Image (cartoon, rainbow, N blue to C red):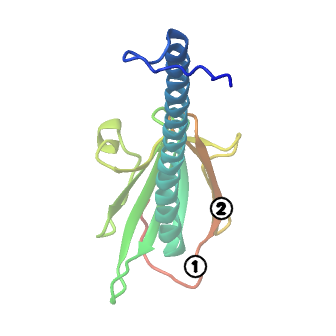
Amino acid sequence: MNAIPTRRPSQDAGLTLVELTVAMALSVLLIGVAVGLFASAAKSQNTISSRSSASTGAQQAMRSLTQGIENASEFTVQTSGSDIMLVARTAGTAATLTWGCRAWYYQASTKTIRMSSTPDGTKILLPTTTQLASWTRLAGGITPVGTTPIFQAVGQNLQVGFIATVSSGQSVTMQTTILQQTGVGASGTCY
């Protein structure tokens, strides 16, 4: 009988250079795929955060406008160059009916919508740049939709339309018609 020669493992058996090279190449490939997936997930998160930021500011501005105009006895839209100011005489939310003045200002140069109010019914006039700095900033990155003004009075209704954009280029378009409540009268004016 012929015996099959058996090979005895040597004490220094290990991986060959080719095996080590293949193992390292596979490791580098797996690490590259993991880094690519992580980078893709981070980019998606930034996109979602940017869109959410634009949406939040736009919604805050739209809520403020809707609440103010729906509770208004009167309002007017005034322009100052490319800037637009909306002023309304609005009912308060307390149990006793009180009237105050509220204004929203779109500043084209800074692309912001700001708001100010006077609870005692003091008139709100077109602000200076210094005065405007003290108004509450509702939203930034705001531009008109096409050539239509951001605030536009149509009878007793207010048409509002704007695009809110953030630095990454993500944007949200907000357009609505706010119906002024009829049948509520008040003496005095806010403008």
**Residue 141 visible (yes or no):** no
Q: Residues within 10 Å of mark 1 (few under 14, many from 20)?
A: some
Considering the image in quadrants, where does the C terminus appear?
Answer: bottom left
Residue nearer the viewer, 172 or 11: 11
Q: CA distance from mark 1 to mark 2?
A: 16 Å
Image quarter for residue 146?
A: top right
The total of numbered circles placed on residues is 2
Image position of 16 with respect to 154: above or below: above
Q: Earlier in the sequence, mark 1 or mark 2?
A: 2
Residue beneath the point at 67% across and 44% down: 145
Q: Which residue is mark 1?
A: 181
Drawn side of residue 164 relative to residue 92, left or right: right
Classify mark 2: helix, strand or loop.
Answer: strand
Question: Within 10 angstroms of label 2, few (less than 14), some, or many (20 or more) residues?
Answer: few
Q: Element at badge 1?
A: loop
Q: Residue at position x 68%, y 25% from top?
A: 1
* Residue type indicated by callout 2: Thr
| Residue 87 at x, y percent in the picture | 47, 59
Q: Residue at x 56, y 30 (%)?
A: 33
Q: Is residue 188 left or right of residue 86?
A: left
Identify which residue, 122 or 119, lies in the foreground.
119
Please name the residue that numbered disc 2 is placed on. 176
- Seen from the viewer's position, the closer of residues 141 and 187 is 141
